[in-house]
């Protein structure tokens, strides 16, 4: 029993990588993930990755920010301490719009950013978890969960045949833990 | 990605579309004739509305092309023929608008200005009436006399001809370069288009606010707003984007331009969505400043639109131009659905008609008896006539192109592989 946890096929060229994905899928080898230093067109559809739901989170944060600010201005300027500003009534909705708008935008952007950080386990100061450091530079990597995916030699052959410049059998998932 | 596109495909303008557009033109002509017999001022106001709308959509088409060249956008290269066709129609639209304005300025009728019975021109009665600048005359108005250095018929008409000729010239130039590029296949004409577009955008940016000040804002010459130009620009840009999108959807349904994919429509949908929000932003910026400052000479504009006859239309304007696009095409899926996008385009096209309606009618025709009588057969008939005329002229212009794609555009491949 080998101690291999992940098999990594390392490619020089994104086209070869796409080709490799096709070959693996044809041979019913499940792909754990693909790492690339740049976006590759059509890869989401090929890997069957669902559309991001970040937009819904952004919308919700926008609604929340807008409601909070509107209630706050309402409480301050209409309910708690009504003030006569320029002869307007005590509940001048048009005057509340700019600040509500700004908070909607602010909460949308911050909310979206932090949701993204949360979902991707990424925030300032965090050592990123990378399976092969060169995937952040000039190499394209397909990762295959070795457990249950046997025989490993066959997978290596498929990757080599598709044009992988190197196939690694890693004993640990991530290499970047300090 | 289909690889079997014929780049020599030529658009043929025949069949049902041609019949229907001609029928709509006929309806428009009949409405105008009957309208003059019934209510000349209302007909003239409607003619001005549609003439302005028509010219604005065509010049925004030239603006679209110029913007793509200056930003060196690749995604739009394969659909450029549609806005280029708008640019081809612009000279005709300009002449129609000029004819309407000249007729409106020179024909007179009995009307009342601020409760006084006078003989005034059909359009721009506040500043174009005889004797308005002559002290002691019954029609003398000190405020208008003070503005007469800018607002007088001669200078006004010179400006109008200037704007429309300049925009038409640039539209013609960009079309010529694009067609020559197709034949010769060098990148030389692309760089030339870039330079010309940059010059056009500067001229367009500085003169469109003035164009809208002249055509629309001077109808209520006592009132002014510096936001008005951008407000009108936003309206023209959103309506032009909607019409480009709608044209593309119909062309695709008719079997043309198969290379225009859901991704291109998605991008156009994003622009429509974004600029609808921009329209609201500018609309509200104008409103808030007037509301907050509360100076009588400024708030008179909104006071007129606050009359019970116009209030429902005033509110509907915001609902269909802001809330409708906001709620309908915010999500990605709805921008990628042809049906939803088509419905949104139609809503926005009607919405910006209503937008212009709310800008023009209260200051010219004034309130009718009831709010629901504001939009009657004259409005609908003139709208139908101009819509038919637009479809007829644009489709005709499109059929004049040797190919419905600029086949030697340097970014064509990027556009054909556009994917988001």
Image (spheres, coloured by chain):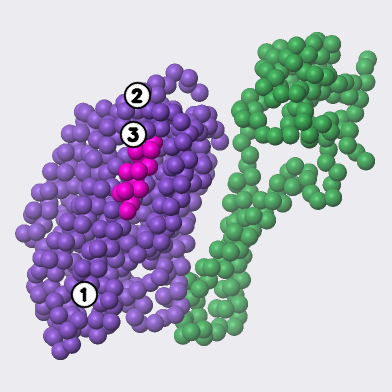
Q: Which mark is residue B220?
A: none
How far, Cα to Cα, is label 3 from label 2?
A: 16 Å
User: Which chain, by letter, is green?
Assistant: A
Q: Which residues are magenta?
A: B166-179
Q: Please rate how many residues cluster around mark 2, counting C-alpha atoms within 10 Å: few if below 14, some from 14 to 19, many from 20.
A: some
Residue B331 position, x and y percent, is: 52, 44
Tell which tag, 3 or 1, sits nearer the viewer: 1
Residue holding disc 2: B9
Residue A20 placement: quadrant: top right
Measured along the vertical axis of the image, is residue B115 above or below residue B2? below
Colour that chain B carries in the picture: purple
Residue holding disc 3: B250
Is there any visible trace of residue A123 in the rendered image? yes
Measured along the vertical axis of the image, is residue B137 above or below residue B364? below
> Who comes first in sequence, dot 3 or dot 1?
1
Residue B103 placement: quadrant: bottom left
Q: Which residue is at 22% across, 28% downward?
A: B14
On the rendered structure, is B375 left or right of B38? right
> Who comes first in sequence, dot 3 or dot 2?
2
Chain of the residue where label 3 is placed in the rendered structure: B
Pick whichever, B74 or B409, lies toward us: B409
Q: Which mark is residue B126?
A: 1
Furthest residue in direction left, as rendered? B37
Pick whichever, B337 or B391, lies toward us: B391
Magenta stretch secondary structure, dominant: helix
């Amino acid at each position: 029993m080998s101690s291999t946890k992940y098999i990594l096929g390392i490619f020089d060229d994104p086209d070869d990588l796409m080709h490799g994905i096709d070959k693996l899928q044809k041979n019913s080898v499940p792909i754990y993930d693909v790492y690339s230093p740049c976006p590759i067109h059509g890869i989401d559809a090929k890997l069957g990755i669902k559309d991001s739901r970040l937009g819904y989170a952004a919308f919700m944060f926008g609604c929340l920010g807008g409601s909070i600010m509107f209630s706050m201005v309402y409480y301050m300027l209409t309910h708690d301490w009504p003030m006569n500003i320029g002869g307007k009534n005590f509940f001048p909705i048009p005057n509340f719009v700019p600040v509500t708008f700004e908070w909607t935008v602010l909460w949308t952007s911050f909310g979206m950013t932090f949701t993204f950080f949360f979902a991707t386990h990424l925030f300032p100061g965090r050592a990123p978890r990378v399976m092969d450091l060169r995937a952040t530079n000039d190499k394209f990597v397909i990762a295959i969960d070795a457990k249950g995916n046997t025989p490993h030699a066959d997978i290596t052959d498929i990757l080599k045949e598709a044009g992988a410049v190197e196939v690694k059998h890693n004993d640990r998932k991530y290499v970047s833990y300090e | 990605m289909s690889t079997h596109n014929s780049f020599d495909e030529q658009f043929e303008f025949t069949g049902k579309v041609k019949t229907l557009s001609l029928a709509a033109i006929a309806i428009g002509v009949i409405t105008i004739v009957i309208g003059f017999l019934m209510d000349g001022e209302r007909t003239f106001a409607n003619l001005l509305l549609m003439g302005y709308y028509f010219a604005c959509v065509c010049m925004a088409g030239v603006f679209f092309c110029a913007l793509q060249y200056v930003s060196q956008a690749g995604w739009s290269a394969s659909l450029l023929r549609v806005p280029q066709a708008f640019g081809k129609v612009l000279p005709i639209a300009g002449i129609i608008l000029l004819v309407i304005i000249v007729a409106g300025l020179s024909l007179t009728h009995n009307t009342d200005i601020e409760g006084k019975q006078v003989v005034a021109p059909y359009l721009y009665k506040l500043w174009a009436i005889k004797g308005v600048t002559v002290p002691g005359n019954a029609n003398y108005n000190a405020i208008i006399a003070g503005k007469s250095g800018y607002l007088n018929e001669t200078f006004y008409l010179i400006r109008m001809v200037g704007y429309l000729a300049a925009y038409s010239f640039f539209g013609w130039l960009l079309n010529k370069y694009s067609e020559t590029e197709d034949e010769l296949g060098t990148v030389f004409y692309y760089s030339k288009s870039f330079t010309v577009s940059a010059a056009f955008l500067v001229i367009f940016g500085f003169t469109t606010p003035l164009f809208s000040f002249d055509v629309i804002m001077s109808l209520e010459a006592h009132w002014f707003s510096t936001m008005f130009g951008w407000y009108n620009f936003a309206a023209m840009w959103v309506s032009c984007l909607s019409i480009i999108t709608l044209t593309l959807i119909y062309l695709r349904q008719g079997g043309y331009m198969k290379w225009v994919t859901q991704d291109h429509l998605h991008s156009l949908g994003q622009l429509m969505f974004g600029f609808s929000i921009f329209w609201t932003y500018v609309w509200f910026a104008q409103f808030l400043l007037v509301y907050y400052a509360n100076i009588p000479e400024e708030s008179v504009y909104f006071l007129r639109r606050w009359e019970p006859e116009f209030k429902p239309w005033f509110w509907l304007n915001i609902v269909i131009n802001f809330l409708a696009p906001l709620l309908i095409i915010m999500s990605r899926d709805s921008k990628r659905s042809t049906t939803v996008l088509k419905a949104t385009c139609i809503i926005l096209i009607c919405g910006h008609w209503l937008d212009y309606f709310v800008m023009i009618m209260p200051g010219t025709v004034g309130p009718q008896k009831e709010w629901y009588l504001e939009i009657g057969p004259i409005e609908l008939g003139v709208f139908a006539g101009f819509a038919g005329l637009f479809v007829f002229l644009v489709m005709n212009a499109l059929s004049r192109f040797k190919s419905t794609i600029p086949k030697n555009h340097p970014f064509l491949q990027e556009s054909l592989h556009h994917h988001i």
